[in-house]
Image: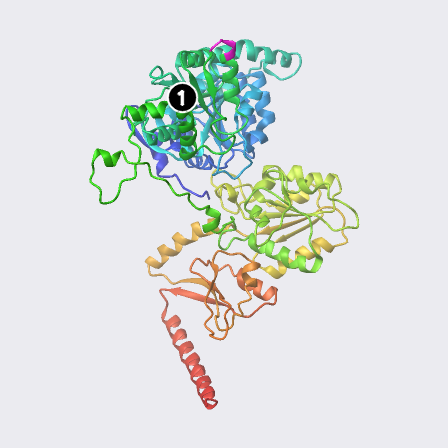
Amino acid sequence: MAERSFVEEVKKLRLGAGEVFSGEGILAVTKALLESGVAYVAGYQGAPISHLMDVLADAQDILGDYGIRFENSASEATAAATLAASVNYPLRGAVTFKATVGTNVASDALANLASGGVTGGALIIVGEDYGEGSSIMQERSHAFAMKSQIWLLDPRPNLPCIVQAVKDGFDLSEASSTPVMLQLRIRACHVHGQFVASDNRRSAFTIKDALENPARDVNRIVLPPASFLHEREKIHERWPAAVKFIEERQLNEFFAADSRDIGIAVQGGSYNTVLRALERLGLADVYGESAIPLYVMNVAYPLIDSEWERFCAGKRAVLVIEEGQPNFVEQNAGSILRQRDVSTALHGKDMLPLAGEYNASTVMKGLRAFFERYGVLEREVAQRKIIPVMAVPADAPATEAAVNAAPIEAEPLPALDDSVHARPPGFCTGCPERPIFTAMKLVERELGPHHVSADIGCHLFSILPPFNLGATTMGYGLGSASAAAFNASGGKRAISVMGDGGFWHNGLTSGIANAVFNKSDNLTIVVDNSYTSATGGQDILSSAALNPTRSTGHEIEQAVRGVGVEWVRTVRRTYDLKTMMATLKSALTTDSKGPKVLIAQSECMLNKQRREKPKQRKAIAAGERVVRERFGVDSDTCTGDHSCIRLSGCPSLSIKPNPDPLRTDPVASVIDSCVGCGLCGEVSHAAVLCPSFYRAQIVSNPTRLDRLRQRVRDAVIGWLQRRTAQRLARYTF
């Protein structure tokens, strides 16, 4: 069950030639694949292209109509290896995953693919996750493209350009026998717009044709002596073919190229940001007309020597706008200009930040420094093309003298740290992973702290308050492998954590099987919430849901035992805190040798709520009886200790003023976002804190029996309250 359904949106994929397509960037990519005659598509979900995988999953009927094979790959390496179908056959194939972590996982397959080359068009759609919106290490795909000689497209972030880039990518791949990487940034994936559609088309050569007419070319296999010739072929044949195609197809764009003696060179993905900054400086309009020459590199690699020479000829200076380090484009461009004896001054990281996301404000500062150095802004003001913001008294008439008053002195804004509290990311309300780490903290009180190796996924939030567990994270499914060195007999056992998504990604072999082979004595906790929840709730091998197009329901415990683990325990309900604690303690203290695996199961609460809430609303609207559980805190009983919050961190737990005038500490409170998981009450009892938590049932469309039961309760409780009040009245002075 994915985070978002595209069942309705995918109907647009059937639009034909001349019809206008309106929608999101990831939908436009899928439509472009259909129009390009792709034969197969594969990929691994991960922001920012998780929804592209969801679109493809929801569009399987349409893909099937055109004979397109779609694979939810087990990992990025699996996806990349799928492109082997394009090595010997004229089959167009596309794969997608998140970068740079995706390219890291897929690197072996991609390097071999790029070495031998391809016959059919091979397109790698990379969701570039660089900048402040990212959840991964700050690296770029550019370096990998350069290392393996894979051409890198970075189109302007609008739908017509993205769609054309997909089509050009396949053509470029076939023209140069080289896989092509299409880089889509977060904003490009989710930008909305329109483009004129073309007809979808089937692959002229099908997968069935390939199976019935098998072919092989030894020269494309990465094995000596052919492998020694691949690099020469890349440089002397494929590269020139790619350059010729890029020049003839005019994939890179020039805007107002000869209007000034300075210019800006920018990768296509940053084009909108640069235009916005120029507009704020008065050097472009809202329609994209720039007063400054622009060289837009929709092909970020390779750079085209002739185009750089043409753009820089006669210019005093050019500013290269390139996010991240190292400054590959700037260095390459500098080398090109020097070799071609072009004297244009080249600027880049000397006027822009060395690293970090280039938003409009950041780019505007760099542009201002560049323009001021070369006198552009002063000239524009003198020619009345820019009207600077001026200080004008409120009661002054709107005269020319008033407009030309002294500039406003802007007061520096206070740092956000001074006015906004830090809000570290944490588990969702009712998350079944929270009680796992609550149990670990409670067991820690008795057994002391243990080394904990974390993993990629929602469970990584345990490294932050209130749990503060986890020392390292090395990669998806590598939690267990991260603790491999911590294996000393007779000492404390190390704990490692991985999710079910990471387990099936590569954790079973890299972690569990490795621990068996090396006779590890450590504990691995596999968090089984039925989905790859961190990537949007997609189904996996062990998902409990029945998926009509995929095989699910395969137990993690069986897989673990299958590779030789003998000590395996499964906790079917993580919210049972006492059982979680007892199982954890047993795993850490047992005399049994060898690796230990604890599988902690409970369905992801977000996916559960996505499924259950619509059912509840429908049932309530139909007049059916619906019972929902909620937890609360008795304000008169709560001591204000707040240990429930410190050992849970649930967003539905808050505080409110103490109703007792003799006590000043605020009391705990459960707000309306509560989903009734019960962990807060479990924590209170397990930690022997307080009896202030209560469970209540909210009944919609109550029956006569419900109403009668409530009247009886009201009567009994009312009688008890009156009797208590009468007793207290006797002691009134």
**Percent position of residue 373, x then y:** 42, 24
In the displayed structure, would residue 373 be above or below residue 665?
above
Residue position marked by numbered label 1 in the rendering? 374
In the visual, does 225 lie left or right of 714?
right
Q: Judge by depth and name the residue closer to the eye, 60 or 503.
A: 503
In the visual, does 19 lie left or right of 296?
left
Q: Report which quarter residue 108 is drawn in.
A: top right
Residue 420 appears anywhere in the view: no
Label 1 is placed on what type of residue? Answer: Tyr
Q: Residue lying farthest right?
A: 490
**Extent of the magenta region:** 338-342
In the visual, does 259 lie left or right of 652?
left
Q: Main secondary structure of the magenta part?
A: loop
Q: Judge by depth and name the residue closer to the eye, 575 or 357.
A: 357
Q: Residues within 10 Å of mark 1 (few under 14, many from 20)?
A: some
Q: Judge by depth and name the residue closer to the eye, 399 or 603.
A: 399
- The count of marks equals 1
**Percent position of residue 714, x then y:** 40, 77
In the displayed structure, would residue 288 be above or below residue 549?
above
Residue 11 appears anywhere in the view: yes
In the displayed structure, would residue 216 be above or below residue 413?
above
**Any magenta on residue 605?**
no
